[in-house]
Image (cartoon, grey):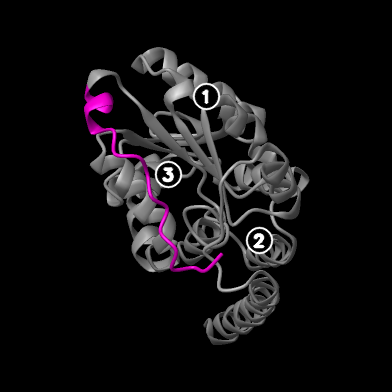
Amino acid sequence: MPATQTHILPDDEETARLRPMAAFFDVDNTMMRGASLFPLARKMYRHKAFSLRQILWFLLHQLRFSARGEHLGDIRAIQDRALTLVEGFPVAEMQSLADEIYDEFIESKIWPGTRAIAEQHLHAGRQVWLVTATPLEVASVMARRLGLSGALGTSVEHVQGAYTGRLVGEILHGPAKAEAVRELAATMGLELDDCWGYSDSHNDIPLLEAVGHPVAINPDAKLRHHAKHRNWPIYDFRTGRKAANLGLKAVGVSGVVWGLWRSLGIVRHRP
């Protein structure tokens, strides 16, 4: 489907005023290109929270993510490594970094088509929430900067203003996203049958099946197959699936090369 095609929503603003409705958006490869956790790792490296070896590890995992998409094993590996490294990092500094990350890395990677869909929901009087495995601090800044209702993200425990390196609950991924949305719906008085869900990944099928209006955006192969079988709408804002996959791989390789070059350059010039 051409990247310029617009997702037209029904004009039911009067219905939205009568009862609350919401749309739930995944982040990585749905709202933005690539993985939102990687810019966080790069930013923390610049603030000397990570070592050269550690940031190279994240670079290589970003390459894998770009080349083959989202896999639970990769996400858990990144999560475990990140939790270990974030222990003792000040919460206030992380909140400040989140705005910088949005300005420097995320804003330019937002899919215009997905953002337009979110804005249509807002215009129709619906709530719009991000639902992501990304740390809550980064997800909340994304929601605020995009003018959305809020965000559900992975929460890390903090004590006396610093992270402990332990999760609050579990990583917000797969079935955990669906459960988080159900809890939010109960709190906000939402009927999920009246709500929308958007994702690129087959891992989010539980979330998409929890709502009445599931939509696949930039879907991976498994989600595309599932969506076609269920007759769900599919929107692909990439300029061509094969070209996009090749481009993502090229970007991933060039990113690793650039990261190696920059990192080694920094090391060489340190006194």
Q: Nearer the viewer, mark 1 or mark 2?
A: 1
Q: Residue at x 26, y 38 (%)?
A: 124
Residue at image mark 2 = 58
Query: Earlier along the polypeptide chain: callout 2 or callout 3?
Result: 2
- SS for callout 2: helix
Q: Residue at x 24, y 19 (%)?
A: 18
Within 10 angstroms of label 2, few (less than 14), some, or many (20 or more) residues? many
The part of the chain drawn in magenta is 1-17
Task: Report the number of numbered marks.
Answer: 3
Taking the image as shown, residue 116 lies to the left or right of residue 163, namely left
Q: Is residue 143 visible?
A: yes
Distance between mark 1 and mark 2 Cα atoms = 27 Å
Choose top left, top right, bottom left or bottom right for residue 47.
Answer: bottom left
Q: Nearer the viewer, mark 2 or mark 3?
A: 3
Q: Nearer the viewer, residue 218 or 161?
A: 218
Query: Earlier along the polypeptide chain: callout 1 or callout 2?
Result: 2
Q: Position of residue 11 (x, y in %)?
A: 29, 39
| Three-letter amino acid code of the residue under disc 2 | Phe
Q: Position of residue 221 (x, y in %)?
A: 74, 54
Residue at image mark 3 = 139
Query: Earlier along the polypeptide chain: callout 1 or callout 3?
Result: 3
Q: Is residue 200 above or below residue 47?
A: above
Asked whether disc 1 touches disc 3, contact meaning CB atoms under 8 Å apart, the reply is no
Distance between mark 1 and mark 3 Cα atoms = 14 Å
Residue at image mark 1 = 180
Q: Is residue 244 magenta?
A: no
